[in-house]
Image (cartoon, helix red, strand yellow):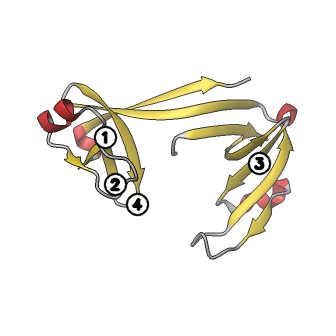
Amino acid sequence: MIDGLYAEYHGLTFKVVKPMGNELLLVTEEDYAEDLGFTADISDASPHTLYFKTVAKDDVDRLYDLTHEARYEGSIFDLFQDDEGNYIGTDNQDKALSFGLEPVKDLPVDGYYSKRVTDDEIEKIVYRKDVQ
């Protein structure tokens, strides 16, 4: 899972794309969502079929914010994941240089460093904070 807002709905977990007052726009790539009233959306923006549904906040069992960090060689870093693997990151230059992180060049902000790591090199830390 990636960082962000999630909702448990009918015993399943869905990413919240957009909170809208007392409603939530949920999304998933799982086709079983059609059985729960989700609508398929095939677009050029995603290589996958995405399924969307707007639900009332009162209809979700749990709403929470999910964030990830990683312990790498005893220090805590931001954790990012993509199709190629895990990356740790920080905006602390001294810390970055001490642990071999490189400046990230394709971000719109300067001063962020990252490094690709394997699952064996890190301890993943997941934070779940309930949202009202």
Residue at horizontal 29 percent and vertical 56 percent from the top: 105
Q: Position of residue 132 (x, y in %)?
A: 74, 23
Q: Are marks 3 and 2 in contact (CB under 8 Å)?
A: no
Q: CA distance from mark 1 to mark 4?
A: 17 Å
Mark identifier at residue 83: 4
SS label for mark 4:
loop
User: Sequence-wise, which precedes: disc 1 or disc 4?
Assistant: 4
Identify residue type, mark 4. Answer: Asp
The Cα atoms of the two marked residues, 1 and 2, are separated by: 13 Å
Q: Nearer the viewer, residue 78 or 92?
A: 92
Left or right, 14 with respect to 58, comes to left
Q: Amino acid at mark 2?
A: Gly
In the picture of the structure, the residue carrying the numbered disc 2 is 85
Confirm or deny contact between disc 3 and disc 1 (CB under 8 A): no
Q: Earlier in the sequence, mark 4 or mark 3?
A: 3
Task: Please report whichever mark, 3 or 2, sits nearer to the chain's N-terminal start.
Answer: 3
Q: Is residue 64 above or below residue 115?
A: above
- Between disc 1 and disc 2, the foreground one is 1
Which disc is residue 89 wearing? 1
Q: Is residue 130 above or below residue 28?
A: above
Q: Amino acid at mark 3?
A: Leu
Label 4 and label 3: CA atoms lie apart by: 25 Å
How many numbered circles does the render carry? 4
Q: Which residue is mark 3?
A: 25
